[in-house]
Image (cartoon, grey):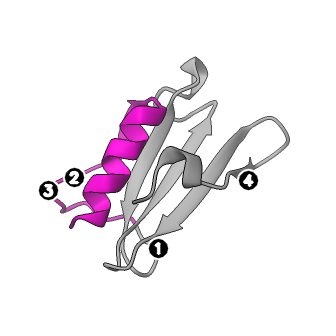
C-alpha cells in the first residue's frame, strides 16, 4: 500500500517554486501530489492531490472527488492514495 513516504518529489518550475510527485497504481489510476506557492494549501505547507487516469490525465468522475483535493497534510495524502488504489 502506497503512503506519503513512498512519494518521490522533484522540483517544480523555478527553484523554490514547489515540488511534485507522481505515482501510478496497478488498477490504472494514479495521483499527482504538489505543493507550490499557488496550490491549495501550499502557502501553509500543505499538499494538493489530483487523481489521474492511465494516461496521466486528471480524472473528474471518481467516488473520491470531482476536482483536485487541497489543504492535505501527509496523513491525508496517504488516506487518499489508499482510496485511489482501491478503485
The residue furthest left is 63
- From the image, tell me which residue sits under label 2: 66
Image quarter of residue 52: bottom left
Q: Measuring from the top left, give residue 76's x and y in whole percent.
A: 37, 35
- Asked if residue 1 lies left or right of residue 18, the reply is left
Pointers 2 and 4 in contact (C-beta within 8 Å): no
Q: Label 3 vs label 4: CA separation? A: 28 Å
Pointers 1 and 4 in contact (C-beta within 8 Å): no
Q: Does dot 2 land on a helix, a strand or a loop?
A: loop
Report the number of discs. 4
Q: Label 1 vs label 3: CA separation? A: 18 Å
Q: Is residue 71 magenta?
A: yes
Q: Earlier in the sequence, mark 1 or mark 4?
A: 4
Q: Measuring from the top left, give residue 58's x and y in whole percent.
A: 38, 64
Pointers 3 and 4 in contact (C-beta within 8 Å): no
Identify the residue at image location x=52%, y=28%.
46
Q: Earlier in the sequence, mark 3 or mark 4?
A: 4
Image quarter of residue 18: top right
In the displayed structure, would residue 10 be above or below residue 30?
A: above
Q: Which residues are magenta?
A: 58-87
Q: Is residue 79 magenta?
A: yes
- From the image, tell me which residue sits under label 4: 10
Q: Does dot 1 land on a helix, a strand or a loop?
A: loop
- From the image, tell me which residue sits under label 3: 63
Of the residues tagged 2 and 4, which is closer to the observer? 4
- From the image, tell me which residue sits under label 1: 56
Amino acid at each position: 500500500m502506497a503512503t506519503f513516504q513512498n512519494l518521490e518529489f522533484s522540483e517544480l518550475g523555478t527553484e523554490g517554486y514547489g515540488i511534485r510527485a507522481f505515482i501510478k497504481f496497478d488498477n490504472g489510476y494514479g495521483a499527482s501530489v504538489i505543493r507550490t506557492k499557488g496550490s491549495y494549501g501550499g502557502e501553509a505547507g500543505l499538499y494538493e492531490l489530483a487523481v489521474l487516469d492511465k494516461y496521466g490525465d486528471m480524472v473528474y468522475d471518481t467516488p473520491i472527488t470531482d476536482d483536485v483535493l487541497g489543504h492535505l497534510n501527509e496523513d491525508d495524502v496517504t488516506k487518499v492514495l489508499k482510496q485511489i488504489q482501491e478503485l
